[in-house]
Image (cartoon, rainbow, N blue to C red):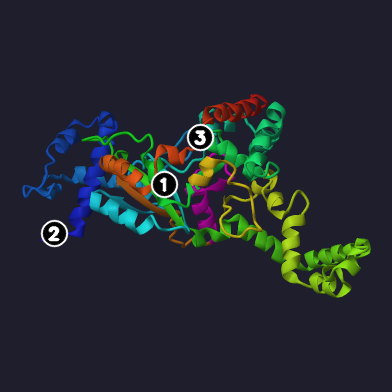
C-alpha cells in the first residue's frame, strides 16, 4: 500500500526544511536542543525513502511547517535584488508544473509537443530563474532604479541611438534583412537577439528549439544539490490562443474596431481625393470608375486594411509599437506568424527565422513577467486561481540524452545560429547600449 497523502505532505515539508538547512539555515539555529532533535530524524525502515514520522518531535514539525509556509508565498521582489525560486512549491504560485525525471517521460513530451505550431515555448537552463528580461537584470544589477533612471526615456534613447549609431549601420542591416527599422519592436528584437539588454523575452514556436535553449549552458546534475530545484531546467509553454488578448494583433483589431466610424469617414475622404486626381485612369480602367470606387469606399474590410497601412507613423502596427505607447501596456507578445496585415518585421536575420522566434514584452523595469501578469489577473478578479503558463521541469540528469536527441530533430548549433558574423553584431548592439547607458550615468 502506498503512503498516505498526509505522509507525503509531511515528507515534502521535511525535505524543504533540509534544503533550507543545507542552504545556510543550520548556521542560524542557536537552539542546541532543537539541533539535537533534528539530528535524530530518520527515514522509514521500509526503504521507501520517506521520513519516519515517529522520529519527529513537535518542535521539528513546527520548524518544518514554518519553512513550508514560507514556500507557499512567492519570492519577495526588490528593485535591487534578482529573486529566484527556492523550491517547486514556491514556483507553484505562478506556474502549472510537471516534473520530467525519466527518458520515457522526456520522449513522450517530445512526441506530443514537437509537432505543435500554435504554442509559445521558452527554454531556460535553470528552473529556479524567474522570467526577468535582460534589461531588468541589467537594471537591477546596476541599481538603476535608485539613481533614478527614467525607464521610458532610457528605451526611447536606446531606439534613437540604434537608428543613428555608426551612420545607421544597424537600421540598414534590419532593412536589408526584411525588417522594419522604423518599428521599435523590430529594432528591439534585433538588439535582443544579439544579447543587448531589452524589455523583450525570447520565445519560439518550436518545442525542439526551446529544448535546445534549456540545455544550452546548463550545469550538470549534482548528486546532492543544496536545493532540489537546482537540478532542473525548464521549458515553459503557452497556447497562443490563451495569450491572444495580450497580443499586438488583438491590440490593432481593438484599435480599429473602436474607431471604425472615424476610419470609414477618413477612408471615404481618401477615395474621394483619389477620384479628383485619377485623370485618364478613369476611362482606361474599370478599377478607377465612379461605380467601382464608390463600392470600394463602402467596403469595411478595405477601410480596415487602409487603416493598418496608413496610420500616422508608418502604419497602425508601427504606431502601437512605439516605446512610449508600449510603456502603457504591462505585457504583450509580438509575432509575424499569421495575419500578414499586422507585420512587425521580426524575421530580420537568419537566426530568428530558424529559431521561429517570437517575443513577449514586459513594461516593468524590475518585476518579472509572471508577477506582472499575475497582478493584472488578481486586480481584475481577486478570486482567480491563475497560472502564468505551463512549465516542464526537466531533470538535468536527462541532458546527455537530450543533447544526443536534438540533432535527430534537426536541431544543431549550425541550425540555431546560421549567421556567421555574430560577434561583430554583438559588439555593435553593445556599443549602442553602452552609449545609451552613458547618457544616464
Identify the secondary structure beneath mark 1. Answer: helix
Find disc 1 in the rendering and name its residue. 210
Residue 329 image point, x, y percent: 62, 51
Residue 30 image-quadrant placement: top left
Left-right relation of 191 to 283: left
Segment tinted magenta in the rendering: 356-380
Residue 383 in the image: state x and y as whole percent.
46, 62
Residue at left 29%, top 56%?
108
Query: What distance separates the C-alpha of mark 3 from that of mark 1?
Result: 21 Å
SS assignment at label 3? helix
Instruction: Determine which of the numbered discs, if any, sits on residue 44 in the image.
Output: none
Q: Of all residues shown, which one is farthest toward the left?
A: 45
N-terminal label among 3 and 2: 2
The kind of secondary structure element at disc 2 is loop
Q: Is residue 370 magenta?
A: yes
Whether residue 41 is visible to the viewer of this picture, yes or no, is yes
For residue 423, above or below residue 253: above
Q: Which residue is mark 3?
A: 137
Q: Which residue sits at x=76%, y=72%?
A: 299
Q: Earlier in the sequence, mark 1 or mark 2?
A: 2
Q: Residues within 10 Å of mark 2 (few under 14, many from 20)?
A: few
Position of residue 248 measured from the top left corner of the image (x, y, whole percent) = 61, 55
Which residue bears the numbered disc 2? Answer: 2
Q: Nearer the viewer, residue 354 or 393?
A: 354
Q: Nearer the viewer, mark 1 or mark 2?
A: 1
Mark 3 / mark 1, whichever is N-terminal? 3
Comparing 341 with 28, the one in front is: 341
Left or right relative to 262: residue 278: right
Instruction: Give the residue drawn at x 49%, y 53%.
Output: 374
Instruction: Determine the CA span between mark 3 and mark 2.
Output: 45 Å
Amino acid at each position: 500500500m502506498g503512503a498516505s497523502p498526509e505522509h507525503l505532505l509531511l515528507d515534502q515539508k521535511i525535505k524543504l526544511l533540509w534544503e533550507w538547512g543545507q542552504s545556510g539555515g543550520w548556521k542560524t539555529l542557536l537552539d542546541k536542543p532543537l539541533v539535537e532533535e533534528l539530528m535524530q530524524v530518520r527515514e522509514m525502515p521500509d526503504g521507501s525513502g520517506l521520513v519516519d514520522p515517529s522520529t519527529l518531535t513537535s518542535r521539528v514539525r513546527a520548524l518544518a511547517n514554518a519553512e513550508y509556509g514560507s514556500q507557499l508565498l512567492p519570492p519577495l521582489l526588490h528593485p535591487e535584488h534578482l529573486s529566484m525560486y527556492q523550491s517547486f512549491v514556491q514556483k507553484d504560485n505562478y506556474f502549472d508544473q510537471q516534473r520530467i525525471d525519466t527518458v520515457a517521460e522526456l520522449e513522450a513530451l517530445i512526441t506530443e509537443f514537437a509537432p505543435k505550431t500554435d504554442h509559445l515555448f521558452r527554454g531556460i537552463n535553470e528552473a529556479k530563474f524567474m522570467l526577468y528580461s535582460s534589461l531588468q537584470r541589467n537594471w537591477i544589477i546596476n541599481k538603476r532604479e535608485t539613481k533614478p533612471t527614467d525607464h521610458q526615456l532610457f528605451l526611447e534613447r536606446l531606439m534613437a541611438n540604434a537608428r543613428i549609431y555608426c551612420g545607421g549601420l544597424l537600421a540598414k542591416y534590419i532593412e536589408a534583412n526584411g525588417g522594419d527599422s522604423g518599428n521599435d519592436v523590430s529594432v528591439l528584437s534585433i538588439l535582443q537577439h544579439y544579447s543587448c539588454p531589452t524589455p523583450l523575452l525570447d520565445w519560439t514556436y518550436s518545442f525542439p528549439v526551446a529544448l535546445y535553449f534549456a540545455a544550452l549552458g546548463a550545469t550538470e546534475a549534482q548528486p546532492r544539490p543544496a536545493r532540489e530545484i537546482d537540478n532542473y531546467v525548464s521549458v515553459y509553454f503557452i497556447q497562443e490562443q490563451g495569450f491572444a488578448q495580450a497580443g499586438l494583433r488583438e491590440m490593432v483589431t481593438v484599435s480599429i474596431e473602436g474607431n471604425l466610424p472615424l476610419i470609414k469617414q477618413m477612408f471615404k475622404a481618401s477615395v474621394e481625393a483619389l477620384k479628383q486626381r485619377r485623370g485618364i485612369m478613369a476611362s482606361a480602367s474599370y478599377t478607377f470608375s465612379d461605380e467601382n470606387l464608390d463600392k470600394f469606399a463602402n467596403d469595411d474590410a478595405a477601410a480596415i486594411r487602409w487603416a493598418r497601412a496608413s496610420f500616422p507613423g508608418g502604419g497602425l502596427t508601427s504606431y502601437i509599437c512605439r516605446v512610449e505607447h508600449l510603456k502603457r501596456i504591462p505585457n504583450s507578445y509580438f509575432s509575424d506568424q499569421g495575419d500578414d496585415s499586422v507585420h512587425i518585421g521580426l524575421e530580420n536575420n537568419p537566426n530568428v527565422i530558424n529559431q521561429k522566434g517570437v517575443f513577449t514584452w514586459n513594461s516593468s523595469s524590475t518585476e518579472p513577467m509572471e508577477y506582472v501578469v499575475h497582478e493584472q489577473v488578481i486586480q481584475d478578479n481577486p478570486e482567480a486561481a491563475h497560472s502564468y503558463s505551463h512549465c516542464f521541469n526537466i531533470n538535468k540528469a536527462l541532458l546527455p540524452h537530450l543533447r544526443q536527441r536534438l540533432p535527430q530533430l534537426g536541431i544543431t548549433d549550425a541550425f540555431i545560429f546560421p549567421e556567421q558574423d555574430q560577434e561583430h553584431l554583438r559588439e555593435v548592439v553593445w556599443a549602442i547600449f553602452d552609449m545609451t547607458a552613458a547618457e544616464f550615468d
